[in-house]
Amino acid sequence: MEATVKKQLKIKACKVRMGIINGVYNAKSGHPGGALSSADILTYLYFNKMNIDPKNPKWEDRDRFVLSKGHIAPGLYAVLALRGFFPVEDLVTLRKTDSYLQGHPCMKTTPGVDMSTGSLGQGISAAVGMALGGKISGKSFRVYTILGDGEIQEGQVWEAAMYASAKGLDNLVAVIDNNNLQIDGTVAEVNSPYPIVEKFRAFGWNVIEICAHSFDEIDAAFNAAEEFKGKPTAIIAKSTKGKGVSYMEDQVSWHGAAPNTEQYEQAMKELEEELANLENGN
């Protein structure tokens, strides 16, 4: 990946993380940990990979994105706002009664949201249906979805995985945000989904392993997925829960908690310093 492109993506990802913290803090609730761990993947998709038009969110030939782990909506909202689907200023209305930015994405009210999600395990099924629809209608659009590693404990995920492989949906990419933590502890403690790579391969998927915070690895993986034919691709993205905020990193307690004022100020200070360093070329 070109250095200038990578720098711009890092800047955007930092701003996405700031949007996540702003939203969750003002809501006094939400899920910052997984939103922060997925921020780089979301940034790459919306600013470098997906064929979309913020001025025409329902464009028939657009690429589709499904946030299967719907509770990390603050991350999706932040990237959609920065991409121009709605005002960045609206991020502070997260979860407010009269806001269109609710705790889980809603395709009926939020511009840029392709599928309403929230019940874990169901989003990938919708993504499979979209990819199949594209194949049947002869469309060239691609479908992307992000799942949590705890989410893949759900049986419906594997039914969808089996079907996607059986139908040869090579226009589908599923990213597993493998931060190793879910609401009740480590994924291994709750109900181990490992070995994740071998499971997806056994279900007939092309599998790529990456660091979720390296734009070089992210770029290489999505390009390889686009070139691979005959099978859907699963990208197992090793990530750090709470990435970008020191006291949230790798801490299960930040799966679904909002920072208080002191914690908010510390988080924003860290992110603002990171942004300044990136913009100044450090």
Image (cartoon, grey):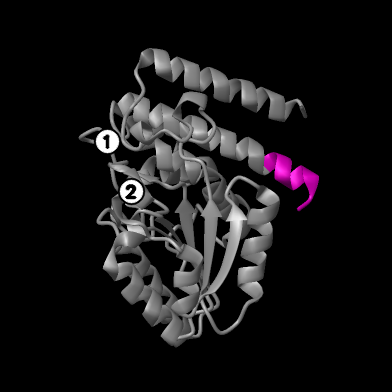
The residue carrying pointer 2 sits among few (fewer than 14), some (14 to 19) or many (20 or more) residues within 10 Å by Cα, namely few
Q: Is residue 124 magenta?
A: no
* Mark 1 surroundings: few (<14), some (14-19) or many (≥20) residues within 10 A: many
- 230 lies left or right of 74: right
SS of the residue under disc 1 = loop
The residue lying furthest to the left in this view is 97
Q: Is residue 131 visible?
A: yes
Tell which of 52 and 10 is nearer to you.
Answer: 10
Task: Give the residue pinned by disc 1.
Answer: 95
Where is residue 188 drawn, in percent x and y? 37, 51
Label 2 sits on a secondary structure element that is: helix
Give the x, y percent position of residue 70.
Answer: 33, 51
Q: Residue furthest top?
A: 262
Question: What's the residue type where badge 2 is placed?
Answer: Glu
Q: Which mark is residue 165?
A: none
Residue that badge 2 annotates: 189
Q: Is residue 243 above or below residue 168?
A: above
Q: Residue at x 52, y 75 (%)?
A: 171
The magenta-colored residue range is 1-8
Task: Judge whether 83 appears above or below 205 on screen.
Answer: above
Q: Main secondary structure of the magenta part?
A: helix
